[in-house]
Amino acid sequence: MAAILETRDLCLSFGKLRAVDSVSLSVEEGALTSVIGPNGAGKTTFFNLLSGHYRPDKGAVLLKGQDITGLPPYVLVKMGMGRSFQITNIFPELTVLLNVCVALTASTGKSYDCLHGLRSSARTVSEAVSIIESVGLGPYVDYKGSTLSHGDRKLLEFALVLAIKPSIMLLDEPTAGMNQEETNNTVRLVREISREKGITVILTEHDIDLVFSISDRIAVLNQGRLIALGTPGEIRSNEAVKKAYLGEDA
Amino acid sequence: MKDRSASFVRRLLPFLAAGALVVYPLALPRFYSSLAIEIFIMALFALSFNLMFGYAGMLSFGHAVFYGIGAYTAALVLKHAAESMALAIACSMAVSFVAALVIGFICVRFTRTYFIMLTVAFGELVYVIGHRLVGVTGGDDGLVGIPIPQISLPGLPVIDLSNMRVYYYFSLVIVAAAAVVLRIIVKSRFGHVLRAIRDSQQRALFLGLNVRRHLLLCYALAGLFAGLAGALLVPFEGMVSLETLHFSTSGNPIIVSILGGTQFFLGPVVGAAIFILVKDTVQNVAEFWMLWMGIILVATVMFLPGGVVGFVARFKPFRSAAGIAKKEE
């Protein structure tokens, strides 16, 4: 399988802290890759570098073989990169339907249309509804984003990202703050996105059992460095990973 | 039965309002026409401001820049180029739009406090330039002796804009037309994208929206309609003063929008009516009308957080009438 996303020697420091330190990683197309590591390992910073939120001090990010280092996020989205945030990020004052309609409009490039309403295109609306139903928010189509529960907001953010039809999805702690049922739902959804839609998924997650059960590949970060990369089986038996998680720093 | 009468009121309301607006200047002394014109102009100025503030979340403390530029442009066209109101209006809108594009290009790069401070800075900058460019703006004296144009359309009697009752209808038509256009914008895809950006710039950016460019277009459109409001001021007052560019003028649409309700399309219109009526009433009986306006504003913010329209919309028969622009839909 070919690499869809690749980082070469990626570095970013905040003052003296090397948040991401020479990370070279390649992600296979269609695979589900998890990025794990202890708190403060640099997972979110790494995500922010991949998605164009931060610009690296050094190194490069390649998407489908193209150098995308330093490109603004909205350009990366056009190239197929979608992401969700650790702290759920939706449009709280818009209804669920309009949230997704805005996302669809963004990807059709009609966002400057001053004359026609969001719902003027029946196709957009029916597409939005089917995306909303696919994440299980069907009953809440006309609810305002701000009235949804925490778990449902996460699902809505999923729907937003799906609406831009990404070929690669970065999910920053997709199950954070969810109860067991919501977590199970989300896991099912992530599996479906990965297996059925063939979307490449990269996610960070605290729940290690969950990571080992759904990932094709696992990357382990510690203190900004990539200390291991491999299948769940390989990672489970990796000495460096054990050390990092047990806190026995060399 | 009750529901029926409610829907009847609802359907009748726009016609009653339109009828009242037509009869109003004929039924009342001329002074009331000029009072209404003041309200129309303020309403349009505030509607343009609220496109930025209510829908895109940009709080500008320098919106008078485009109002003033519109007024000066119209005055200069009428004085030096041609006594044509159509040309004056077109030029005002174009110049204000371009000015807003230039200033907005810098402002939209920043958010929150930094955005606000930049709008303040540009407001002051343009005011000082206006003050110094005596040859163009007349400086402290303002521009005076501006000819008030007539409009002659084939097959119609000449429309004399210096007649206050005539100007009432003229400004009513222009402001109503502008409001319709603004309403279409607010209801459009672009309008909803602006609301999304207001709610979360980051989420919008990571859905592939060029946030800055959308905000810039919004800022420029707000400038364009503020320029139109400024142009309408010229034949009404027969002069343009530096006050149109002043910081305090920038404060008016903010007060007006909050009074009426920023999350309702017609909020700024209702706010403008209250603002002008309070000003006029208080000025007749007491000094320091702004003091009273301030008290009303504080009370509104404390007790009617949705503005006056937000308050009225709580009552059923009025809901859909006020809802001409509830955030959703």
Image (spheres, helix red, strand yellow):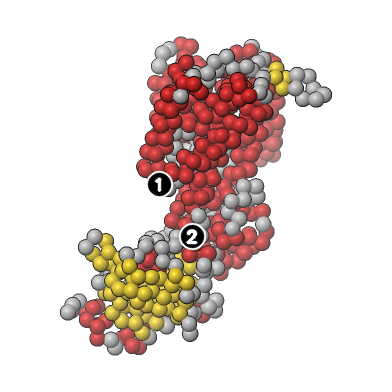
Give the structural element (helix, strand or loop) at label 2.
Answer: helix
Question: Seen in the image, is A149 located left or right of residue B169?
Answer: left
Percent coordinates x, y for residue B264 in the rendering = 54, 39
Name the chain under label 2: A
**Residue B87 visible somewhere in the drawing:** yes
Give the structural element (helix, strand or loop) at label 1.
Answer: loop
Q: Which quadrant would residue A223 be assigned to in this image?
A: bottom left
Which amino acid is tagged 1? Thr
Q: Which quadrant would residue B95 be assigned to in this image?
A: top right
Q: Is residue A215 above or below residue A125?
A: below
Q: A88 or B176, which is in the foreground?
A: B176
Q: Which residue is mark 2?
A: A74
**Residue B61 visible somewhere in the drawing:** no
Q: Is residue A240 above or below residue B27?
A: below
Residue A77 tag number? none
* Residue at 49% across, 74% down: A64
Disc 2: CA contacts within 10 A as few (<14), some (14-19) or many (>=20): many
Q: B74 or A82, which is in the foreground?
A: B74
Disc 1: CA contacts within 10 A as few (<14), some (14-19) or many (>=20): some
* C-alpha span from label 2 to label 1: 18 Å
The answer to whether mark 2 and mark 1 are in CB contact below 8 A is no
Percent coordinates x, y for residue A127 in the rendering = 62, 64
Which amino acid is tagged 2? Tyr
* Residue at 60% across, 13% down: B31
Residue B111 tag number? 1
Name the chain under label 1: B
Question: Seen in the image, is B141 located left or right of residue B75?
Answer: left
